[in-house]
Amino acid sequence: MTDALTLSQVKKSFGPAEIIRGVDLALAPGERHAIIGPNGAGKSTLFNLISGRFPLSGGQVQLHGRKISGLAPYEINRRGLSRSFQITNLFQRMTVFENLRCALLWARGYRYSFWHLVGRQAALNEEAEQQLEKLGLQDRRDVPASLLTYAEQRTLEIGTTIAGGADVVLLDEPTAGMSLTERDHAIELIRNVTVDKTLLIVEHDMGVVFDLADRISVLVYGQIIASDEPDQIRGNAEVQKAYLGT
Amino acid sequence: MSTSNLPGGALLRHSAIWIAAIVVIIVMPYVFTSSSSISMMSQMGVFIVFALSYNMLLGEAGMLSFGHAVYFGLGGFLTLHAIRAVNDGAWSFPLELMPLVGGLGGLFFGVVFGTVSTRRAGVTFAMITLGIGAMVEASANMFTNFFGGESGISGNRVTDVTLLPFSYGPQVEVYYLIGAWTVVSALLMFLLTKTPLGRMANAVRDNPERAQFVGYNTTMARFIQFALSGLFAGIAGGLFAILFEIMTAPNVGLIQSGSVLLMTFIGGLGAFFGPIIGAVLVTYMHIALSGFSEGWILYFGLMFVLMVMYVPNGIAGVIVSHGPPLRAGLMHRFAVPYALAFVPALLTLAGLVAMIEMGYHLSLSYDPSRPIELFGMEITATSVVSWVVAVAAFGVGVMALRWAATRISLRWGEVNQAMDAQRAKQ
């Protein structure tokens, strides 16, 4: 079976500084994979490379066996890879509902149409309402994204990421800055919305990681030093030395 | 800008506004019957279409263009050439549909120049549009066959090829033709904001990065929006050509581009009706002030600066911000502070106008000591007393305005609190 996402010898340099130093990673379809590592290890950079935000300095990224490195972010998105951002990245002046509907437009084939009225597309609106319900944001439907609470914005960020139905989802620290209750709620949401999807998640919170992930990779100084199941990672001496701090 | 779901009630309300607009357009020539008013209202129609097309860029897609007159002007030139061709017997095309020629021309040049300019957003885009605007204006002096050189080109709109039994010689017939095109164009541009393209234009404006990560090529979204905006600018240009029967190089130029930016900004970018208000107001002021004062451009400049500084959301923004207190039944609470601001505002304005007019009179008049008539008074610009009074009126007015502004913002605070309390009760 083809892997959902394959990274081979992915490298990234900014000037003389090599930030990602040859990363190999393979995610089986349906796998929930977490990347952990100390600050500055290059986790967010790795996400930016996979999603096409930055060009690679070397190596290759494949989605379902097809090369995606070198494509523009929107082309990668159209092939079924979606991502969220560490810093909330929404359409701030639009309402919650509008954000979700915009996230659906391309996926539902509307492209750049100027001959459909979005208000009249019953199936589209129905689907956006369902997404709204799935996120538990029904009460906030008509509130501009900029006026949501932080946790609500993070929730909507996840919602816009998965709305289009991408089967490979990248979440960059989705629970950062949340209270404990909010965090539990967010993990539950992530678990629900990524059923049957391949998930790659960057997370600082070890509770979240060991709770959610099928496999964990440890990224230190631009290289993956270990990639295994949670229990193995927990017991790995090298990881403990480099990261878990014991 | 709000949600574009149109349940029955909202749809009805929308239709009511459009029908009311049509009725107003039909009735106006019976209210303002003079030929100069009808000409002015015709110009308002032309500039409503032009300003709305400009707002497709600036308001809807966040693209600041300094060269939008290119599509307006070229559309106008093409329309006038088409009209001349019909008059020469070389072509047959009804006058009513002539603005389409301008529209297609605007679309064509929108596609051509859009491929260059929309590759980049922000400052780069603005600079490219400025360059294209300057380039087209300069080329008007090179391609004299098309642009007619210094004197421009003129034509006669009475082509005898029409769909309806009108000659379009009389001003009022042209007014109704422009009115019809204004309604149709405005309606189409309104509906455009409710389409996937219109929504994604907003999305690209608000957050181009996220737009990419929901599958949209932001360059393509900007490009299509830009080309369609050229279409409507070209229609406006075609209407302009029919109205004035003459097109000159400045019609494609940077001053024309600046004036549509002015209209759109003063009216307000945030609401669909903003540019309509701006086009009506600026056209009126342009015509009224240029007859009244030598310094009319200075007044425009001052108004623009003051709007940018104190009312960045334009007139429409002011109107929209009063919606919530109006719905909450709290408008009456503004009556006193607004009335208190009105008097010093008038005083400030009077002082300012007196100073500007006296200044112009002193520097431009053959006989500076000849009194000028202002506010129904005879004012002598060479008298020190006149200046002292004008400066005092301005100074006292400004101070009183600042005091009144504090009162208004305090009252806004109270009203916002009252509205929060109302919401909490529900």
Image: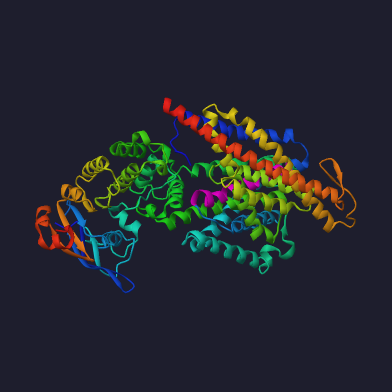
Q: Is residue B271 above or below residue B357?
A: above
- Residue B44 sits inside the magenta stretch: yes
Q: Is residue B210 above or below residue B120?
A: above
Q: Is residue B259 above or below residue A116?
A: below
Give the x, y percent position of residue B163. Answer: 64, 42
User: At x 58% / y 40%, what residue is drawn?
Assistant: B318
Instruction: Look at the image and tell me in which quarter the N terminus of chain A lies.
Output: bottom left
User: At x 72% / y 46%, what residue is drawn?
Assistant: B395
Residue B174 shows in this picture: no
Extreme residue in the bottom direction = A16
Extreme residue in the top direction = B425
Residues shaded magenta: B38-61
Give the x, y percent position of residue A223. Answer: 20, 66
In-image side of A96 versus A29 (left or right) = right
Which of B417 and B309 lies nearest the eye of the viewer?
A: B417
- Residue B304 sits inside the magenta stretch: no
Give the x, y percent position of residue B189. Answer: 53, 44
Instruction: Look at the image and tell me in which quarter the C terminus of chain A lies.
Output: bottom left
User: At x 39% / y 56%, what residue is drawn?
Assistant: B217
Which of B421 and B98 lies nearest the eye of the viewer?
A: B421
The main secondary structure of the magenta stretch is helix
User: At x 47% / y 39%, what residue is drawn?
Assistant: B2
